Image: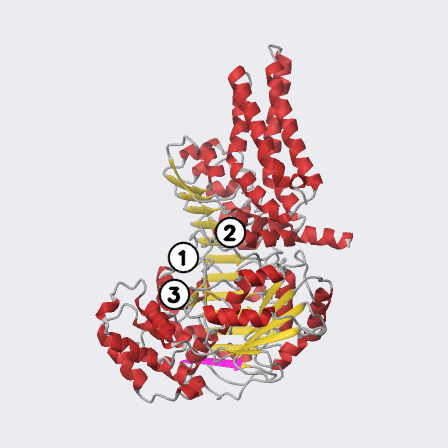
Amino acid sequence: MAAEALIGAGVGDAVSKLSDAIIHVLKTTWQFRSKLTQIQETITSNKLIFDEIEKLIEELDRPKEEKEKFVAQMKGAEALVLKCEQIKWRFWKKYHHALKLDDLNASLLRFCQIDLQLMMMRGVMDLLVAKDVQMRMMKGDAARWSSGTPLLKGVVIGFDDRLRDLKAMVLKEASGDECSVVVVSAAGGSGKTTLATMLCHDSAIQEKFGRNIYFATISEIPNLKIAVQNLLQTNQAGQKFDFINDDEAISQWGRFLAEKKSETLLVLDDVWSDSIIKRFMFKSNNYKILATSRFTFTKFPATYQLQLLTPQDATALFRHSAFSECGIEDTDIPDDLVEKLVKCCKQHPLALTVIGGLLKGTNITNWLLMLKNLSDGQKSVLDLDESIPHSLARSLEMFEENSVIKQCYLDLGLFPEDQKISATMLMDMWVHLYKDDEEGLETMNRLFELSYKNLATLLPIRKNSPAIANYCDEKGVMQHDLMRTLSIHLSSKEPMEHRKRLIINANGEDLPQLPHTVDARLLSISTDERFCLKWNDIEAPKVEVLVLNFMSKTYLLPQFMQTMECLKILIITNYGYHFSELQNFPTLPSLSGLTTLRLEHVSISSISTSILYLPHLKKLSLIMCKIGNSFSEHTPNKLQTLVEIDIDSCDDLITFPAMLCKLVGLRKLSVTNCLELSSLSEEFGKTLTNLEVLRLASCSKLAMLPESIGNMQKLKVIDLTDCLNLQELPADIGELGCLRMIHMRGCTGLSELPSSVKELSPLEVVCNEEISFLWKGMTNVVVQLVEEDKLATFWTITKAYSRELSLDMQIKM
C-alpha cells in the first residue's frame, strides 16, 4: 500500500499544522490565550503517542478511510483555531467560541485516549504483532515476529555452527505434499530449547516464514488442548476455543493451517513421543515442524543430533557462569582447576552453567570441595543421562543440608513442569516456613540468589512495574525440567512416610499407593485430566503447606484435608483449559488454623461460604477466578482476621463485593487486571478505614473512586496505574492525611485534579509525562517521572476491548 494510504503518513504533518496555527494565533492576539494554551498542552502531552502510532501504523497497514478521519479531525481543529483571529469585541461571539475551544480540547483528549486506540483495536491480531515487533525494535532485535517464541536467556556460547547446520535442514525444500519434520535430539539440558529459540529469532528463518512461526512446549505429560489453544489464541482476535478433546484441538489446528497460503513453521519443544509429532502433521509442502526431544525417533530421518560442546566452548561457558559479575577475579582460580571441573561437567551446557553458578563468588576452598564431590564415583561420558543428574546432585552438597537457600530450591519442585511459579505464591509459603518478611524483600533476595546460581530462571520483569503490595508482584521463576526432576529426587531420599516434603505426581487415573500415615510438612499433589477423583485414605496431620495442582472441570478436594490440623498455607491451582468447580471443601472445625488461601482459575461459588467462616485467615488470593455473586449473600462471621486480599485477572468482577467491605481489619487490597470492574460502592470507603494500601491497577473500566474514600485515614499508597477510563479523583482526597504515594501512570482519562490535592503533603506521584502536567506547580508534590510503556498500555486496551472486537468480527464473518 502506498505511503499516503497509511494513517501514519499524515499524523505528523496534521498535528504540526494544528500546533503551528495555535502558535500563530497566540502571537497575533491575546484573546482565548488560556484556551489555546490548554489545547497546545494537550497536543504536547500526547506527542509521544502520535510518534508511537506512526511507528505502529507502518506495521498495521490500516486503510485510507481511517487516515482521513484523523486528518479531518486535525483540519477542523486548525480551522477553529484560526477563526480566533476573526472574533473581535462581541462578547456573545467570544463566549460561544470559547465554548467551542473547550469542546475541541475535550474532543482531542477523547480522541487521543479512546478513539485512536479503538481505531488500532480493530485488528487485535495485528496489534499484537505490532506489539511484538516494537518490543524487538526496542531491544535492538532485527527479528520480525514469532508467536509464543520465548526470548533468549543470558549468553549463548558455542551454538553458532549448530544454528547454521540446523537452519540448513529446516530451510531445505520439502518434496511431495507432506509436511517436512526435523527433530533436534539430545540429552536433557544439552541446549535443545536454546537452539530452537535461536532458530526462531534468526533473520533468514523469519525472512522465509515471516509471521507464521509458532512455538509450543509439549512436556512429558502433554495437554494438546491447551497447547493448541495457546497457538491459536493470539491469532483469532481474542476468540476462545472450547475443545472437547485433543482430537478436536488438532483438527482445529489443521483447519487453521488450511487457511494459510504462506510458509508455516511449528516448533514442538520437549516432545517425549513421536506420536505427538504425527498428530500435528498435515499434508502441505508449505508446512514444517521442528521438534526437540531427548529421544531419537527413527521414523523421522531428518534428525539433528546435538553434540556436546567443544572443550574450548565448554570452558568459555563455565568461565562465564562462574566469573561474570561475581566480584572475584578468574586469576584467583588456577586454570588447571577450571579444566578439571569442566571435565567433570562432561562439556554439558546445563551442568556447566549450574555448577559454575554455584561456585560464582566463592573462594578456592569451595572450588576444591566441589571438585572432590564431583570426582567421586565419576561415570563414563557414555552414561551421560545418568552421570549429569548425578553430578548436579553432588554439586548441591556444597550447601548445608538444612540451609534455607537449598530448601527454597527444593520447594520449587512442588509445582508442575514448564509452568511459571509466581513469586508471590512462594512468598506466601516462605513467610511461614522461613520467616520471610511480608513485603517480599527476603523472598526476592532468595529468588535472585537461585537465579544467580543458575538453579532457576528469574522471569523478565515488566519495566516500571510498581512494587506496592509487595516486592514480588508480577514476578516469577521457572525451572529447567532437569533441575526440577533433581529437586524432586533430592526430596525423595527417605521412605515416603518419613519425607518432610512429599511430592506426588499422578499421571493417570489413580494415585500411587501411599502409606496410611505420612509425616510430611509440605505436601504437593499434581493430577491430570484422567484423574478419577478417588483419593487414598491417608492421614497427614503434620502438613503445614498443601499445594494441589490439577487440570479438570470438576475437582474433588481430598477428604484427608479434614484431619490436617496444622495446615496454614493452602494453594489450589487449576492448570486446565476450563474454570474448575471445587467440591468437598472442608467445613469447620477443619482448616481452622489456615492463614493463607490462594485459588487460581477456579469458580468459587460453591466454596465462598466456607471461605467466609475461616476463623484465622489472614490473606486471600483469587487469581483468574470466576467470582460472580459469590460474596453478595453472606455476612462474614469469622473472617475478621483477614488483613490482605489479592484479586487479579477476575474478568467477571463488576463491583467490589459489598460483603467484603465489612472486613474492617483489612490493611492491603489489590484488585488488578479486572477488566470489567466499573464501580466501587460508597460502603467501600466508609468501612475499610484501616486500609493502608489500595491497588486498582489495570482496571480499565473503572471511571471513578467513591467519595467515601476520604474516610480512609490510614491509607498510605494508592495505585491507579493504567486505569484508562478514570475520569476524576474524589473531591475530598485531600483529607487522606497519611497518603504518601499515588501511582498514576497511564491514567489518560484524567484532565484535572480536585483542589484538595494541595492539602496532601508530602506526596510522591509516580506517573508518565502526560499526567505530570496535572501536578505542575504544586510545591507539596514530588513527581517521579517514569517512561511511558505505550505498548503495555495498548496491551491493556487490547484485553479490555477484545470481547467486543471478537464479537464484531464473528458477525462480519
Give 218 or 611, whichever is nearer the viewer: 218
Q: How crowded is mark 1: few (under 14 residues within 10 Å), some or many (20 or more)?
A: many
Residue tagged 1 = 471
Q: Does the magenta stretch include residue 97?
A: no
Quadrant housing the N terminus: top right
Residue that numbered label 3 is attached to? 447
Q: What residue type is labelled 2?
A: Met
**Are the residues flagged by discs 3 and 1 in contact, CB closer than 8 Å?**
no
Report x, y in % for residue 190: 45, 76
Q: Do the residues labelled 2 and 3 touch (CB within 8 Å)?
A: no
Q: Is the magenta stretch mostly helix, strand or loop?
A: strand
Residue 201 picture location, percent across and down: 53, 62
- What is the number of the mark on residue 305? none
Sequence-wise first label, 3 or 1: 3
Residue kind at label 1, given as amino acid type: Tyr
**SS category of the residue bearing label 1:** loop
Separation of marks 1 and 2 at Cα, in angstroms: 29 Å
Q: Residue at x 53, y 66 (%)?
A: 199
Residue 526 located left or right of residue 65: left
Provide the residue span drawn in magenta: 500-505
- Residue 737 position (above or below residue 142): above
Residue behind mark 2: 137
